[in-house]
Image (cartoon, grey):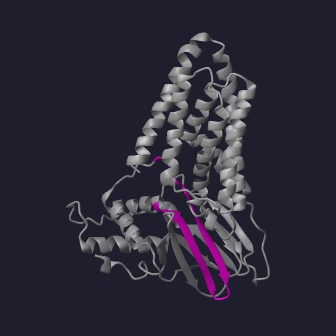
Amino acid sequence: MAASIPSRIVRHGWRSKQLVSLVVAAGTLPCIVLGHTTGLSTADFTLGTNGITAEVILAGVDLTLALAQLETDNPSDKNHDGTLESEEFVAGVERLRKFAAGCLAVEFDGQIVRPATPQLELDDKDNFHIKLTYPSGRPQRLRVRAALFAHLPANHLHFVSIQDADGKVVGNKMLKPADDVLEINCPSGSTQTGRRASTFTDFLKLGVEHIWTGYDHLAFLLALLLVCGTFKSAVQVVTFFTIAHSITLAFATLNLVWVSGRVVEPAIAASIVYVGVENFARPDGPKGRWLITFVFGLVHGFGFATVLRDLGVASSTAGVAVPLVAFNLGVEIGQVVIATVLLPLIWQLRKWKPFLKWGVPACSSIVAAVGGYWLVQRVFFT
């Protein structure tokens, strides 16, 4: 079977076996249940004198979702026997190559340009790299449309950055299904630079959205705030949690530390279980909570970082500092808003003795149970 894999896939030590597993998974599994959806991919374009090169990076999970959608439209298992024969497998690999070649629709001066045969790579962080070359003259007007949205969930985002040969960014944009096109006027020479589009706001919003829809992080924060009876204790919890995950993001920015999501995601779930159980055992507020908050904050920080880093933003030639700083700030804004809403309500309820006796343990038990569910799911089913 390995002999049937296109030579472009098996080269330079690329992880062909994992590419094979993605194709097989897409052909045999109609749906993959994940603790976290990824929802972000990137494309880096470099303008040359004789054409343009591009590198598209998306998570292996997103590639599998895209291939599963293509599989639904055109099944590889033609005989429906539940297995992939060699011919069916080759068809699946060919579908992978077609997806790679068609993930972006590129136009030079209003004319559609097809890429050369794409080069495919799966790195050691399970990011899928598509390297594309558009061999043509340097265009005056470049238009890029994210065609991959047709095969991905409706909330997927795609960040496109275009730079000149000297590394200066001439345009970038966060694309979404409703706004899937970036169009720029290319500078006439590599020493000229167009206006750099601001992406700070896009990643700021992404950070706010992530904390507001990251139900595991919300559960952890709720469990921490449940036993905060004073303003001082609440400030300690929020401050040490913020400091901890900001440190993690700083390390990620400098490429000093990286931890696999397969470790981080179960650890986040375990932190929720721990805090919930501790609240149940000590509803009046455990001493030294700031320390455990700091430790688990480091873990959650890796979770925040992997939203960008494991999706290839750290590999972007446009730089990782602005996305990570903006994303982190968005997380903090979202977190402060949540604390501002929850704390007055919790403090009012804590004046009611039945809530201290029954409410705090009940809420903590629910949080611990949900954390336990996520822990089992992330250890055994992802």
**Where residue 357 sits: x, y (%)?**
55, 14
- Residue at 42%, 77% in the rendered image: 9
Span of residues in magenta: 35-60
Q: Indicate whether 75 appears above or below 217.
A: below
Q: Is residue 202 visible?
A: no
Residue 259 in the image: above or below residue 114:
above
Q: Is residue 93 left or right of residue 284?
A: left
Q: Residue at x 65, y 37 (%)?
A: 291
Residue at 65% x, 63% y: name it.
255
Q: Give residue 4's position: percent from left, percent from top.
A: 31, 79
Which sits in the foreground, 253 or 24?
A: 253
Against 102, is 212 above or below?
above
- Comparing 117 with 251, the one in front is 251
Q: Any magenta on residue 165?
A: no
Q: Quadrant of the N terminus?
A: bottom left
Q: Locate residue 60, reporting x and y percent.
A: 46, 62
Q: For the stretch drawn in magenta, what is the main secondary structure? A: strand
